[in-house]
Amino acid sequence: MTSPRRVVVVGADAAGMSAAHQALRTAARRGEALAITALESSDHTSYSACGIPYWMAGDVGSGDDLVARTADQHRDAGIDLRLGTTVVAADLAGRTVTTSAGEVLGYDDLVVATGAPAVVPDWALRADGTSYDGVGVVKTLDDGAAWVRSFTRVGPGAHVVVVGAGYIGVEVAEAALEQGFGVTVLTRTRGMGMLEDEMSDLVNTGLVDAGVELVLGAEVTGLELDGDRVTGVHWEGGSREADLVVVAVGVRPATDFLAGSGLEMADNGALRPDPHGRVADHVWAAGDCCEVRRRIDDQWVFRPLGTHAAKHGRALGDSLGGGDLSFDGMVDTSITRFSACGVHLEIARTGLSRADAETAGFDPVALVTEGTTAAGYMPEAEPIAIWVMADRTTRRLLGVQVVGGHGAGKRIDTAAAVLWAEGSVDDLAWMDLSYAPPFSTTWEVLQIAARRVAERL
Ligand SMILES: Cc1cc2nc3c(=O)[nH]c(=O)nc-3n(C[C@H](O)[C@H](O)[C@H](O)COP(=O)(O)OP(=O)(O)OC[C@H]3O[C@@H](n4cnc5c(N)ncnc54)[C@H](O)[C@@H]3O)c2cc1C
């Protein structure tokens, strides 16, 4: 009798555990047993980081509510899950990994699913590399718990400075306002910089209307401290007193332990797996430690999102288990909301930016269209703005962005489906979408927006 194939998974969250469970299922269907060991440096596994800002806001009762599968559930499924175990080196030729405790584990297949920890700038760190009191990132369940404790400690009326105005910065600003804090958002560029300027301006206006002090073009230079505790933030041209400082300036793939391995990596260390998750013989990867392929312009891009981690992890697991599922890239779709102090904005995008489209050689034509989310005579009607971009020559739909009230955001999925199918702006304008007054105008605003662009081509 042959011994089961040994699979070592490094990183036991969305991508790693999706892969592990799918590999077991697929292999079992084929009559093969796998011996899967999952090594995880933290004490947590399979939780929704995406829910942490809503826990901070008070919408989610506890960190436990964010746990999708417990360590015991993984173990019951037959996975040897080892928490508190960090991999520090991998020998791909010898097929071993080494942990920080010096243990060497052999594998037949290695799955890299180490994610991308938050970037912490030097100004936020003590000389020993730890963060000052009241300063931190929003990345892990432990971070969430620390912020919930800090929010209780400082109490309503305290002031929170958020550095960064991307998805997490905006979600944290919502949470802090909901907890009754004063909020300053500092951004080097602009609010939601992944949007076109005219759409980003709408987000900026929403933040300010909700009472956020928004400082655009702010390059943070340092902190004001009382002993070890933060009391303020300085940036070029300004400063602000602060009880808490949330740093949300991006993430970087955790692939340092693969340095020198010869694997293809992007400049930031992201791996580039094929649709089945393969990066080399017997080496697989998925999730935030990887770039993803954008179908529209066939480019590798770094989009650390749970939706990609889950899908790519599953495809990887299936292929590792002997199946053929593949993750065939994405069209750059994402969504968030900012909802606080009487302002409710749903913010979503899919496809290329104008700059991406020009780089890819398209001849983009784009317009912003304003309308309402429901028939104007209905009480639920709220403003919505939609940016649509198409290629002048081929009429291909290239990108759509949405900022608007309740019901605005998920309209992006219709546009994403057209992009996925490489459809035209005319497809979007004329396809059969549902209509009744509580949900849309007779001519759905997304279709009006597409039609207006079609008429300009
Ligand atoms: C606040 C917040 C909000 C978010 N909101 C959304 C959202 O709304 N929608 C969306 O699609 N995505 C969202 N995301 C992103 C989403 O959470 C991630 O894309 C997803 O968690 C990635 O899964 P992953 O398994 O690749 O990486 P991770 O979840 O980061 O897991 C990687 C694991 O590897 C472990 N690890 C790292 N290095 C080692 C090592 N050397 N040895 C052992 N273990 C190691 C880490 O401890 C970690 O547990 C959000 C993220 C955050 C932080």
Image (tube, rainbow, N blue to C red):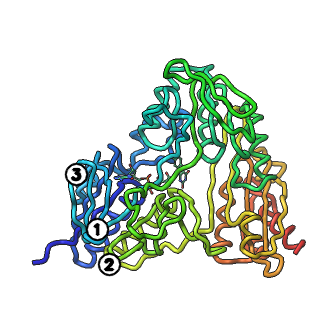
Tag 3 secondary structure: loop
Q: Are marks 2 and 1 in contact (CB under 8 Å)?
A: no
- Residue at 49% x, 22% y: name it: 228
Q: Report, in whole angstroms, how far the alpha carbon at label 2 lies from the one at label 3.
A: 32 Å
Name the foreground residue: 325 vs 358.
358
Q: Please name the residue that numbered disc 3 is placed on.
A: 102
Residue 61 place in picture, x, y as percent:
46, 34
Q: Please name the residue that numbered disc 1 is placed on.
A: 24
* Residue 322 numbered tag: 2
Q: Is residue 148 left or right of residue 34?
A: right
Q: Amino acid at mark 3?
A: Gly
- Residue at 24% x, 67% y: name it: 107
Q: Report, in whole angstroms, how far the alpha carbon at label 2 lies from the one at label 1.
A: 10 Å
Q: Is residue 295 above or below residue 383?
A: below
Q: Is residue 203 above or below residue 174?
A: below
- Residue at 37% x, 64% y: name it: 19
Q: Is residue 122 above or below residue 430?
A: above
Sequence-first tag of 2 and 1: 1
Indicate which label's residue lies in the foreground, 1 or 3: 3
Q: Residues within 10 Å of mark 2 (few under 14, many from 20)?
A: some
Q: Is residue 273 left or right of residue 300?
A: left
